[in-house]
Amino acid sequence: MSTANREPPRPAAGRAGTKKELPERFKDYRHVWVFIELERGQVHPVSFELLGEGRKLADKLGVELAGIVLGPPGETTHSAVAEAFAYGADLVYYVEAPLLADYRNEPFAKAMTDLVDTHKPEILLLGATTLGRDLAGSVATTLQTGLTADCTELDVDTDGSLAATRPTFGGSLLCTIYTLNYRPQMATVRPRVMPMPQRVDKPVGRVIRHQLSVVEDDIVTKILGFLPDSQSAKVNLAYADVVVAGGLGLGAAENLQLVKDLARAIGAEHGCSRPLVQKGWLSADRQIGQTGKTIRPKLYIAAGISGAIQHRVGVEGADLIVAINTDPNAPIFDFAHLGIVTDAIRFLPALTEAFTRRLSPHNRDKLAS
């Protein structure tokens, strides 16, 4: 039988059919970097969460973990350097310049890309905050490398590649993305997705300084003034110790008051699933899930929430999840620690009354201890 007209075999689909051929110019890229997000003197907690995750990746790869601090001269920037070491960094790359006093994309992106080109990290992690997302996109585009956004899990594959997992197809699936042939491998992670590592006091270690290579005249954007966020005085839902949330199972907007009453009784914050925000029952800053806030409370009570994957990725880091739903087959019972099959509209008032009788105002914080 003649084989002259046979088609050549097709490569296997997916990553199995993709051959990793790292170009020679990337073979000396090593170590894991974490951007320490410093804005107006405050380090965003996601930076410390990423240092904890970066520590695991660096240990698996047998490389160093570095913090990247970009900021103005002064005590707050020096303090950010010290905190990076306290949360696990082996060394810190440090760019200090007055132009970095307020975040602007141009000087920050220039500082970061210059650092990468000079010191060659294999992995670069940033928080998926407003600032971090803006900076990560610019840096990845300038370096012409891959960026996996809003990751829920990070790991190192058998060949040393970063395996970055994130929701896809509207949150209905989780996919793991690899940047096989480019460096650095970049990813952003939302606040509260990763646990906060333990802080350990230790001396400031190795600090490598780098000069910023731009001047004010090179920057198009100018800082005219600073107006604080009108919402900044409110409790940050993502960092609450106890959260009570409601979903479509509540049936009507007025029934959200039952969630608020329970939250008030136990000293908790209240939130909701995405459909309630879409209906206008609560504001977007109360939304929990993939497109809202990611939370890691010590106690999470979900009333009338089905628990689709979009919601699951925002709450599964909670220490204790209590689900209340009339549907015994609701997806939330697959990951809740305690499930109660009942009508939340009848159950919540009874639960609130029980807590109110048991807890006095001065000891409500016992739930979070």
Image (tube, rainbow, N blue to C red):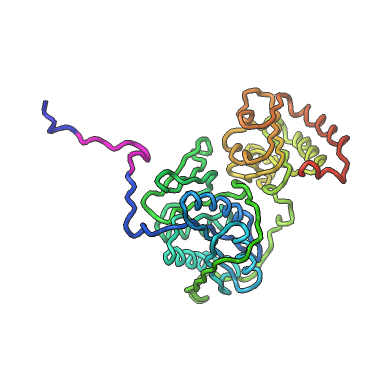
Q: Quadrant of residue 76?
A: bottom right
Q: Quadrant of residue 251?
A: top right
Q: Is 284 drawn above or below residue 119 in the view shown?
A: above
Residue 244: image x %, image y %? 73, 39
Q: Is 14 drawn above or below residue 45 in the view shown?
A: above
Name the one closer to the observer, 92 or 4.
Answer: 92
- Residue 167 among those drawn in magenta: no
Question: Magenta residues, as a range?
Answer: 7-18
Q: Which residue is depicted at the point 61% across and 55% down?
A: 48
Q: Which residue is depicted at the point 54% across and 67% down?
A: 206
Report the number of discs: 0
Name the one closer to the observer, 242 or 118.
Answer: 118
- Relative to 289, 154 lies left or right: left
- Relative to 324, 98 lies left or right: left
- Residue 14 among those drawn in magenta: yes
Q: Which residue is depicted at the point 54% across and 63% down?
A: 91
Name the chief secondary structure element in magenta.
Answer: loop
Q: Is 140 drawn above or below residue 10 in the view shown?
A: below
Residue 271: image x %, image y %? 70, 41
Name the one closer to the observer, 20 or 111.
Answer: 20
Q: Which residue is depicted at the point 58% across and 44% down?
A: 291
- Relative to 236, 313 lies left or right: left
Residue 111: image x %, image y %? 49, 67
| Position of the N terminus by quadrant | top left
- Relative to 21, 290 lies left or right: right
